[in-house]
Image (spheres, rainbow, N blue to C red):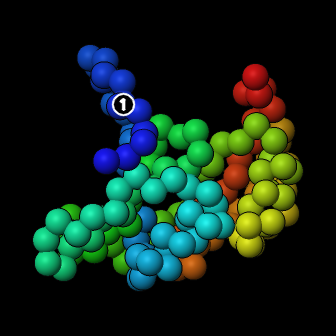
Amino acid sequence: MTDTPPAPPVPPGTFLLELVPVPVSDIDRAKEFYTERLGFHVDVDVRPADGVRIVQLTPPGSACSITLATGIATLDMPVGTLRGLHLVVADIEEARAALIARGAEVGPVEDLGGVFYAAFSDPDGNTWTLQHMPWRVG
């Protein structure tokens, strides 16, 4: 059981993106990176059958999680091939500094026409970016 509150009902006609598989070579190493370096919350870490492991992690405040899995053919992808997942933040300099303080290697902030980005990757080479859109800060 997790301490995460139950998800709200799914309204008719919606398509909610809530889980993205991330292909990794070593689940324990990836789990450590995502929790210790990025601060993701562990929702699930189960071994429902021999040779099967599922780890679900959620970024702080996100409605969408990632899954690290082994032994599930439908989630089998070449390791390190996921590209460009975005973590939207209110203050990119603060978010970047927090990740760096936790030991993540995050590139410099780039201004691409008023939207700001800072790129990084996990230990397997899956790429991520922090994204800041000033008009979305509330």
Which quarter of the figure has residue 54? Answer: bottom left
Please name the residue shown 64% across and 61% down the image. 38
Please name the residue shown 17% across and 65% down the image. 48
Please name the residue shown 59% across and 45% down the image. 60
Location of residue 4 with respect to 124 vertically, above or below: above
Q: Nearer the viewer, residue 76 or 47?
A: 47
Amino acid type, residue under disc 1 in the picture: Ala
Please name the residue shown 79% across and 57% down the image. 98
Location of residue 11 with respect to 26 vertically, above or below: above
Q: Identify the element where label 1 is drawn.
A: loop
At which x and y percent is residue 46?
27, 64
Q: Quadrant of the C terminus?
A: top right
At which x and y percent is residue 55?
36, 63
Location of residue 79 with respect to 43 vertically, above or below: below
Q: Nearer the viewer, residue 120 or 1?
A: 1
Q: Is residue 104 left or right of residue 10?
A: right
Q: Is residue 82 visible?
A: yes
At which x and y percent is residue 17?
39, 39
Q: Which residue is mark 1?
A: 7
